[in-house]
Image: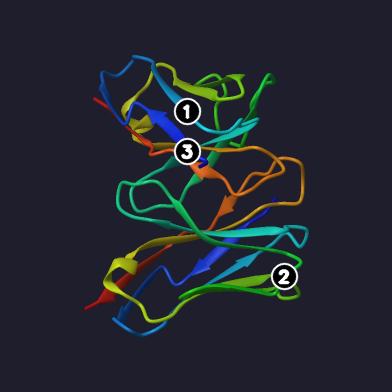
Amino acid sequence: GENVEQHPSTLSVQEGDSAVIKCTYSDSASNYFPWYKQELGKRPQLIIDIRSNVGEKKDQRIAVTLNKTAKHFSLHITETQPEDSAVYFCAASPMDSSYKLIFGSGTRLLVRP
Amino acid sequence: GAVVSQHPSWVICKSGTSVKIECRSLDFQATTMFWYRQFPKQSLMLMATSNEGSKATYEQGVEKDKFLINHASLTLSTLTVTSAHPEDSSFYICSAIDPPNQPQHFGDGTRLSIL
């Protein structure tokens, strides 16, 4: 089955700097890759997603890139702000009829003011 | 739009009791719902996929007799933790989709503490 690896596990950046989180997946047939932000004790919230027929997607300060050949996708956050501090999860959806998500292990992002 | 409500938000009970958690889609029909468990500082682990009107599909290693899932309507799925023990203490989160539309929309989660 699908396996998703996420790095780094923790990331500390200065306010205004960029942050990059990377994920790899094992199932070449996976076709949907969302990123979720989770604050302590709260629900995961979708921040951006990408499908396998697209190489890059951007929404203001957030962008995601996908390399299907390498089975690798990344989250880029520019001009980071203290409120960006949270745990970020990547996920992959196998190309079957289940629509389930397999999550990465998470990255704890700390933006220092 | 796409609001998912989960109830209760917090449960504390004695070992051996059964606990039911409800997951409702408030403004869309969720033919598929998912149940996850999340231990402190860990990722979301998929427990099972629940399809309206059919039996749930459990992930490997999840005891179906321990975690009973019912998805009797297009807006409600329930997870019952039977004969709960301290090791079942965790954060349980549901999500819902109306396939083929994605993404998954998550509930607020239920923090379960078994004494």
Whether residue B76 is situated above or below residue A85 in the rendered picture: above
Numbered disc 1: secondary structure:
strand
User: Residue A76 location, x and y as percent?
Assistant: 50, 76
User: Closer to the camera: disc 2 or disc 3?
Assistant: 3
- The residue where tag 3 is placed is B3
Q: Chain of mark 3?
A: B
Q: Is residue B26 left or right of residue A2?
A: left
Q: Amino acid at mark 2?
A: Val
Q: Chain of mark 2?
A: A
> What numbered label is drawn on residue A108?
none
- Crowding near pointer 3: few (<14 within 10 Å), some, many (20+)? some
Co-location on one chain, circles 1 and 3: yes
Q: Amino acid at mark 3?
A: Val
Label 1 – label 3 distance at C-alpha = 11 Å
- The residue where tag 2 is placed is A54
User: In the rendered view of the protein, which quadrant contains the C terminus of chain A?
Assistant: bottom left
